[in-house]
Image (cartoon, rainbow, N blue to C red):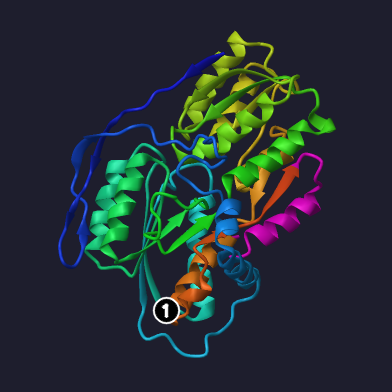
């Protein structure tokens, strides 16, 4: 088995507080790889799985169930008007083929508007996994405007250091997007809200499909991870572990390629030329899947090698319709923006007890067997605000 890992362990983080704002100033600091490999007790490293967290905190499970009903329902007008516009800063790794992040902002804005929450949103998009210094700079810039809420993500170790400082400052309230597994080491010093679609749950749906009879021909497979970090580990390592238990499945190779279409294409070309026995490549993101498709077509291996999507955005659904993508796990995308809007509205109304610590949205498995009408119905549901 061949595995290539490449990352830069030189990091810059900002770290100075004043009475009004947490200002993040870049300091060079060596850090270790921030992954989520499964620990012996079944947790994801320093993360509680959502099921474990709810088992330990049953009241959270009850609040989360009621909140999910709220997210899935039509917007309700609040009984009283909001005093002033809510200021929200959004820093997302949205410069990628996946439209998840852009739709997130659109659905957040639309739901706030429907509820009647006056708001000001300042959003910034960066490349995933490779612009953490730029993300830190944007956070520092956003904090000078004293936002009420800051929406960020948590993937690399460097993100964790930044978020810890934001939480310790108390303001703004932190919403962590694209993560649904609370950090155990943070104890009670948690962000205001975790929101997204559980990576291991989505991967489980893909695993079940691949192990089903209709894909029983998959024997030799490879994995293309994104950048080292939380998302790659949660999506890739859970897939690796599950298939390792199957005696007829062999992991031939795995690579870290970033969430980068061209790097994924280059890796897939090398992989397939060196290992012609590979019949399935597991892709950890949309950009990776598109790069793998490019490589398959370049080598004329359509029908011999398959890959999956992850997320079920517009481009993935188009590739399924063309017969170039075998399967994807589709997020009911806009529910994440709706969840953030509802959490902010409840908090502004003094009802933060009705906001769970974690909201995890629903998935649907989509394959080439789905007809156009079925896919259109799923798109209407998933993109109900951002279409």
Is 74 located above or below residue 190 in the figure?
A: below
- Would you say residue 145 is visible in this rendering? yes
Q: Which residue range is magenta in the image?
A: 367-387
- Which of 331/324 is in front? 331
Residue at figure coordinates x 58%, y 26% from the top left: 223
Residue at figure coordinates x 72%, y 34% from the top left: 326
Picture coordinates of residue 190, whole percent (x, y): 40, 59
How many marks can you see? 1
Residue identified by numbered label 1? 348
Question: Counting other residues with Cα less than 10 Å from the Cα at mark 1, is it few (<14), some (14-19), or many (20 or more)?
Answer: some
Element at label 1: helix
Residue 374 on the magenta span: yes
Is 74 located above or below residue 57 in the figure?
A: below
- Would you say residue 360 is visible in this rendering? no
Question: Along the horizontal axis of the image, is 328 left or right of 226?
Answer: right
Picture coordinates of residue 98, whole percent (x, y): 53, 45
Residue at figure coordinates x 56%, y 33% from the top left: 236
**View extreme (top): residue:** 274
- Which of 238/153 is in front? 238
Look at the image and tell me in which quarter the N terminus lies. top right
Question: Along the horizontal axis of the image, is 19 left or right of 201?
Answer: left
- Which of 74/158 is in front? 158
Picture coordinates of residue 253, whole percent (x, y): 57, 18
């Amino acid at each position: 088995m061949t595995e290539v890992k490449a990352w830069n362990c030189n990091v810059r983080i900002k770290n100075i507080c004043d009475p009004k704002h947490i200002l993040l100033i870049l300091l060079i600091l060596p850090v270790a790889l921030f992954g989520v490999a499964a620990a012996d007790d079944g947790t994801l490293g320093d993360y509680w799985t959502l099921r474990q967290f709810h088992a330990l905190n049953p009241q959270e499970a009850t609040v989360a169930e009621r909140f999910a009903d709220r997210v899935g329902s039509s917007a309700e007008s609040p009984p009283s008007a909001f005093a002033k516009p809510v200021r929200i800063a959004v820093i997302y790794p949205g410069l990628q083929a996946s439209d998840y992040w852009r739709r997130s902002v659109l659905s957040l804005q639309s739901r706030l508007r429907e509820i009647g929450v006056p708001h000001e949103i300042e959003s910034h998009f960066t490349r995933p996994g490779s612009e953490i210094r730029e993300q830190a700079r944007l956070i520092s810039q956003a904090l000078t405007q004293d936002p009420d809420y800051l929406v960020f993500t948590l993937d690399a170790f460097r993100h964790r250091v930044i978020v810890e400082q934001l939480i310790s400052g108390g303001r703004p309230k932190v919403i962590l997007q694209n993560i649904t597994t609370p950090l155990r080491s943070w104890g009670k010093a948690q962000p205001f809200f975790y929101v997204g679609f559980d990576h291991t749950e989505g991967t489980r749906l893909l695993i079940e499909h691949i192990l089903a009879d209709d894909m029983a021909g998959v024997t030799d497979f490879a994995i293309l991870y994104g950048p080292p970090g939380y998302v790659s580990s949660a999506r890739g390592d859970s897939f690796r572990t599950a298939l390792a238990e199957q005696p007829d499945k062999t992991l031939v190779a795995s690579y870290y390629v970033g969430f980068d279409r061209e790097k994924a294409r280059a890796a897939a070309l090398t992989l397939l030329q060196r290992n012609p026995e590979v019949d399935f490549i597991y892709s950890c993101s949309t950009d990776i899947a598109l790069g793998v498709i490019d490589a398959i077509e370049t080598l004329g291996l359509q029908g011999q090698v398959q890959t999956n999507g992850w997320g079920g955005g517009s481009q993935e659904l188009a590739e399924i319709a063309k017969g170039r993508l075998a399967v994807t796990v589709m997020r009911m995308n806009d529910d994440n923006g709706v969840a953030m809007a509802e959490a902010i509205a409840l908090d502004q109304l003094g009802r933060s007890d009705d906001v769970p610590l974690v909201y995890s949205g629903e998935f649907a498995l989509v394959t080439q067997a789905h007809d156009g009408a079925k896919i259109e119905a799923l798109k209407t549901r998933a993109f109900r605000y951002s279409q």
